Image (cartoon, rainbow, N blue to C red):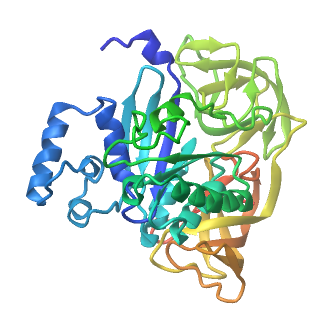
Amino acid sequence: MLIDPKEKSKSLLRFTTAGSVDDGKSTLIGRLLYDSKSIFEDQMDHIVQSGKRLGREELDLSLLTDGLRAEREQGITIDVAYRYFATPARKFIIADTPGHIQYTRNMVTGASTVDLAVILIDSRKGVLEQTIRHSFIASLLDIRHIVFCINKMDMINWSQEGFEKIVADLGKLVKKLDIRDPHYLPISAKYGDNVVDKSDNMPWYSGKTFLHLIETIDIEKNKNPENKRFPVQTIIRPHTKEYHDYRGYAGRVAGGVFRPGDEVIVLPSMLKSRIKSIDMFGKTLSESIAGDSVAISLEDQIDISRGDMIVAPDDLPAISQDINMMVCWFNEQPLKNGGKYLIRINSNEAGCIIKKVNYRLNINTLEKDTENTAVQMNDIADITIKTSKPIFFDSYKKNNITGSMILIDEGTNETVAAGMIV
């Protein structure tokens, strides 16, 4: 299949939808795809037939993303649903995340890789606890662009006063959470007002439609261009006549720009060398940037293993066995204070012990609970751990990749938590 060069060069925007139950997240995505002509005929037929089976009289576009039977029967989102579509301006990957409190871990998972968050609010109900919860999680995950869609404007008779009251309440939340780039849109996902086309029912609104906004918003992709970070995933030794002496360290650039000739230092050995070449699929590159999967070869023969990191000599990450982090607990078994787990940061793995739960966050009120520190599934808490060996890392705000980690149960090998290093 040939790819149009224009299609290949279009920028990609990843965004997630969040909000309280029945605020219209799935309907918004369905309406967006329907009005932008991004639904195939067989998908449309499937939605119509599913709606009839469920006794829905009107076309229910939420069925496009609610793929699980339980989701369709209950009219809710349970798991994260991913959808891809493109317009002449941009390509998009959407993560439709659940609104229920018991699926907070699914929301964290779906939002962990996005550039923008869309938070829906029922115009009749205003700012709810789930609005605060999802806004906080978005800010915790360092999502810097948040679009607040005040939905179901048809239910309050397209009231400008009602919209402005909710925007004023959101403004206080945005200030408290220090959200950098907030946007506010009055919409009706069910009828398509201000989703793809401008609404005739709200002539008082002069801003962009939802589609126009996500097509044109300037996303801060490389948040930390100056911090050189290259976690090593594997060692490449071809053992062929042509590449008999080649030794490459393969991985994905986690930050900064690497070029042949750059002086680098290898962690944890602290040995210095220079980059000899940067290779990708048989091609030698003049530079590599964050997100590139490449193999780096060095001028000196250094013992480098999976889990090591190549960085700039004048910009080292933190190196410590004591790590403070915010974690979202995924597992049905509660966190054990003093319990032993495996920690994995990129390709680096070590044993660790939970030293202390500093506080459990009430993410409905944003209050820190220092007394009831029992961490259950879907809870978010601030903890301190001690690792079995020195670990090199950055704060999550400095580098989302080298500042994020997962905790793994040693016995079951289950991922029990995801964390952001403070």
326 left or right of 413? right
- Is 245 placed above or below 57 here? above
Q: Residue at x 9, y 54 (%)?
A: 52
Residue 264 horizontal/vertical position (percent): 82, 30
Task: Tell which residue pokes out farthest to the bottom in this image.
Answer: 371
Residue 349 in view: no
Question: Residue at left 72%, top 45%?
Answer: 399
Farthest right residue in view: 314
Q: Is residue 407 left or right of residue 308?
A: left
> Which of the 4 image quadrants contains residue 82?
top left
Q: What residue is drawn where x is 14% and y is 44%? A: 46
Q: Position of residue 240 (x, y in %)?
A: 52, 17
x then y, percent, for residue 245: 65, 19
Quarter of the figure that contains the N terminus: top left
| Left or right of residue 329: residue 179 | right
Looking at the image, is 124 positioned above or below residue 59? below
Counting the numbered discs, the total is 0
In the rendered image, the quadrant that contains the C terminus is bottom right
Q: Residue at x 63, y 62 (%)?
A: 169
Compared with residue 155, is residue 341 higher up or lower down, i.e. above or below?
Answer: below
Q: 376 and 316: which one is in front?
A: 376
Rendering coords of residue 44 (x, y %)? 18, 38
Q: Is residue 373 above or below residue 78?
A: below
Q: Quadrant of residue 83?
A: top left
Residue 177 seen anywhere in this rendered image of the structure? yes
